[in-house]
Image (tube, rainbow, N blue to C red):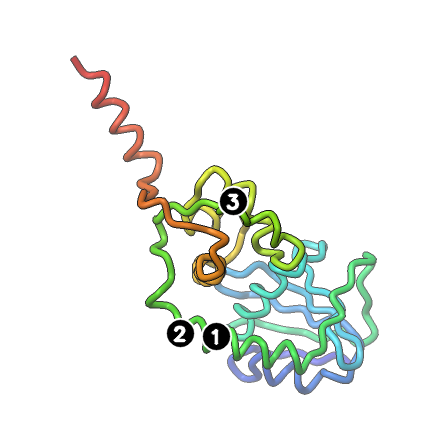
Amino acid sequence: MALFGSLDALPLEELLQLLAQKEGALEIWNLKDIPATTIYLKPGYIRSVDQGGRPLEALSAKATLQALLRARRGSFEFLPGAKPKHKVRLNWPVEKVLLSTVTLQDELERYRPYFPPPKAILKASHIAKKHLPEESFLARSLPYLEKGVSAEGLSKALGLPLDLVRFQLFRLERKGLVQRTGQMDHGRPALLGHLLRGVRP
């Protein structure tokens, strides 16, 4: 039997607890700033998190789940027995996902004053590549961090929430894997204005 409703009446945290031992697809839509998302479940686990019919890789899936767990508006429907057509599997325990999301939210609030400013340019340190196997965020970010990038720029490039990117950069900075350059990302308009001023007679 299908289950449907709205997140303002039944938030995702309660939904996942209710459906934790079920198998099927939880479709969620009508969300502000979040594309329609499907969470595939099997007893005790999240199989995959899909958007646009395609599975999200682990980092994007975590960010999406975090945003969905904070959402209080949106529609949902659970389709029992539905399975993903692709072979990608996260196989995350539902209870662990809920706990880690709460923990992450606490850490975001606790360390927010120490996050790098959104426009501060950061670069990877010379030891960054040695930590790639254990740092999935660093692995995805390294091509940008080698050239120097701001949290804002990285957020757009990776398609991840700005707060999450700033938190991850803060973690990498504490480990000595990225460093602030002292420069700020002023964006294309400011750069263009600077170039134009340089060619004026």
Element assignment for label 2: helix
Q: Residues within 10 Å of mark 3 (few under 14, many from 20)?
A: few
Q: In this figure, which residue is indicated by the disc labeled 1? A: 105
Secondary-structure class at tag 1: helix
- The 10 Å Cα crowd at callout 2, few under 14, some 14 to 19, many 20 or more, is few
Mark closer to the chain start, 3 or 1: 1
Q: Measuring 72% from the left and 77% from the top, which residue is drawn there?
A: 93
Left or right for 105, reference 118: right
Q: Which mark is residue 126?
A: 3
Q: CA distance from mark 2 to mark 3?
A: 30 Å
Nearest to viewer (mark 2 / mark 3)? 3
Say which element carries label 3.
loop
* Mark 2: amino acid: Glu
Q: Position of residue 193 (x, y in %)?
A: 25, 29
Inspect the image, locate mark 1, and give the three-letter code of the amino acid beneath it. Gln
Amino acid found under the numbered disc labelled 3: His
**4 and 37: which one is in front?**
37
